[in-house]
């Protein structure tokens, strides 16, 4: 991750899952592991997601624990260093807390992430970290993304 210059902010990376080169086996099933990372304005926070192979579930099951890092790469490296037994414990925790309406939950988390990023942009603009014109373009883009996410909530609601 390059060093940030004044008037630059990291992009919101929550929409992109980073696959980890590992799988977890539990209860006769195989789960692929990925991490989604978001910048909260202070640090990068990763969340592990487990997706059962062959289940047709495209979203997977999130672990409630977070993986912090000072940079995107550090959060990804930390995620890659989990031992098999640690990943298994995190999968078991995720399964025990599995939500029924994952598609809606995922969409809701994306909306909240975009709102946090929007707030981060506005604060950076007001404090002079970003110039007004550049921030306004970013804010317009995030607003458009939020509107599209809200439109998708209708199809995600009630789907188990």
Image (cartoon, rainbow, N blue to C red):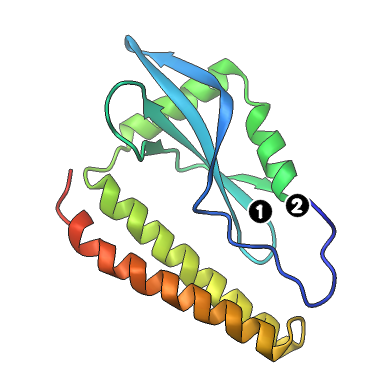
Q: Quadrant of the C terminus?
A: top left
Question: Is residue 80 placed above or below 47 in the rendered structure?
Answer: above
* Residue drawn where x is 39% and y is 30% of the image: 51
Q: Residues within 10 Å of mark 2 (few under 14, many from 20)?
A: few
**Residue 66: which disc?**
none
Can you say whether 123 is above or below 60 in the image? below
Residue at image location 27% in from the left, 68% down from the top:
151
Could you tell me which residue is drawn at 68 percent across and 26 percent down? 81
- Seen at 68% across and 90% down, the residue is 132
Q: Is residue 124 left or right of residue 117?
A: right
Q: Is residue 153 left or right of residue 158?
A: right
SS for dot 2: loop
Which residue is under mark 2? 70
Q: CA distance from mark 1 to mark 2?
A: 6 Å
The residue singled out by tag 1 in the image is 44
Q: Which residue reaches farthest top?
A: 28
Q: Are marks 1 and 2 in contact (CB under 8 Å)?
A: yes
Q: Using the image, determine if residue 39 lies above or below residue 5.
A: above
Name the image quarter holding residue 95: top left
Q: Earlier in the sequence, mark 1 or mark 2?
A: 1
Expressed as whole percent of the image width and height from the top left, the position of residue 40 reads 61, 63
In the rendered image, residue 90, in percent from the top left (x then y), is placed at 48, 29
The quadrant in which residue 117 appears is bottom right
Question: Quadrant of residue 153 in the image?
Answer: bottom left
Instruction: Report x, y in % for residue 103.
Output: 28, 49
């Amino acid at each position: 991750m390059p060093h940030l210059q004044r008037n630059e902010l990291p992009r919101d990376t929550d929409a992109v899952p980073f696959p980890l080169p590992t799988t977890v086996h539990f209860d006769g099933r195989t789960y692929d592991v990925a991490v989604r990372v978001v910048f909260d304005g202070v640090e990068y926070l990763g969340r592990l997601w487990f997706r059962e192979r062959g289940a047709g579930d495209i979203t997977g099951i999130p672990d409630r624990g977070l993986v912090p890092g000072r940079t995107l790469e550090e959060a990804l490296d930390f995620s890659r260093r989990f031992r098999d037994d640690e990943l298994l414990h995190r999968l078991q925790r995720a399964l025990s807390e599995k939500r029924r309406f994952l598609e809606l939950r995922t969409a809701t988390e994306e909306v909240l992430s975009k709102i946090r990023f929007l707030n981060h942009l506005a604060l950076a603009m007001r404090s002079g970290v970003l110039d007004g014109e550049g921030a306004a373009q970013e804010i317009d883009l995030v607003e458009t993304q939020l509107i599209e996410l809200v439109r998708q909530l209708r199809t995600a609601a009630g789907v188990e």
